[in-house]
Amino acid sequence: MKLCIPITASSNAEARKKIQQGLALAPILELRIDGIPHPDLKGFLSRRKGEILVTNRMREEGGRFSGSERERVDLLKKAVALGCNYVDLELRTSRELRSQLKNEIAAHKGRTRLILSYHNLTKTPGIQGLRKKLEEGQKAGADIVKIVPLARGMEDNLKVLSLIPMARKQGMVIIAFCMGALGKISRVMAPLLGSYLTYVSLSKGQESAPGQLTVGEMKRITQILKAS
């Protein structure tokens, strides 16, 4: 089970402190720069001892970035140039800006893996709609496709989790689970089915999305499952 801790902060100093804490607990951190004015990407990435996933989430999918779309993607391009391990870009981003980011990755010999993501903050679409998003991500050239809607019923977890074996049969790398209180079980099940990552918070109150378990809770659940 590969754990990823999202780092949300409102300043560079706060982010640096949380990065140090997070790297002691998980092999991958998601650095959410959308809430940090003038993020010190060079500083964050030069001192890392683990893998860093850089995300500059758009407001439409739960982020806090207030600049233009071009400025938003330019920061991700800078992260690629500085050698981050992953960048996460929303699938709904314009084709032109997606292409620019892919070109930046190619220019640096593909050392950064591209996650193309889809988040739905209000519901879980039907299975056909979810499969369409999976196909869109694949066709758009994602190294990893991420699909995360909000669970409004327990059955929504089954819809989303069914994407994981489907994607793996096609040789795709996928991250898929549900947000929200009803989606917690999918955060546990997803990595067991082969989801590339599962996201956990540093502690209570530091969740980057609703329904996120803490790193301590996820590790205890994993221990219980292994012991049974």
Image (spheres, rainbow, N blue to C red):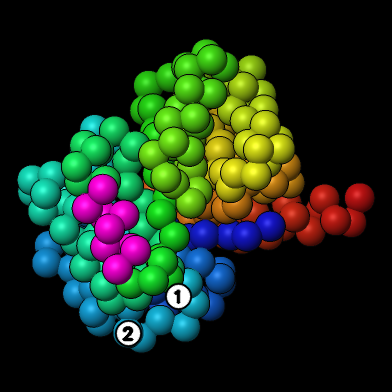
Tag 1's secondary structure? helix
Magenta-colored stretch includes residue 134: no
Question: Which element carries disc 2, helix, strand or loop?
Answer: helix
Q: List x then y, in percent, for residue 93.
A: 25, 38
| Residue 216 vertical placement versus 50 (above, below) | above
Residue at 72% across, 42% down: 193
Q: Which mark is residue 47?
A: none
Chief SS of the magenta region: helix
Q: Quadrant of the N terminus?
A: bottom right
Query: Mark 1 = which residue?
Result: 21
**Relative to 167, 91 lies left or right:** left
Looking at the picture, tell me which residue is in the foreground, 128 or 8.
Answer: 128
Disc 2: CA contacts within 10 A as few (<14), some (14-19) or many (>=20): few
**Could you tell me the amino acid type at mark 2?**
Ser
Question: Percent x, y for residue 186?
Answer: 63, 36
Residue at the far bottom in the pictured view: 47
Whole-percent x, y for residue 60 in the image: 24, 33
**Where on the picture, by quarter, is residue 75?**
bottom left
Q: Residue 141 location in percent, x, y? A: 42, 45
Judge whether residue 214 can be spotted in this image: no
Q: Is residue 98 left or right of residue 154?
A: left
The amino acid on which the numbered mark 1 sits, given as a three-letter code, is Gln
Is 53 on the left or on the right of 99, as rendered?
right
**What is the CA distance from the residue labelled 2 to the residue labelled 1?**
16 Å
Label 2: which residue?
46
Q: Is residue 166 above or below residue 72?
A: above
Q: How many other residues sit within 10 Å of disc 1, few (<14), some (14-19) or many (≥20)?
A: few
Q: Which of the two marks, 2 or 1, is nearer to us in this view?
A: 2
Give the magenta part as a residue range. Answer: 99-107
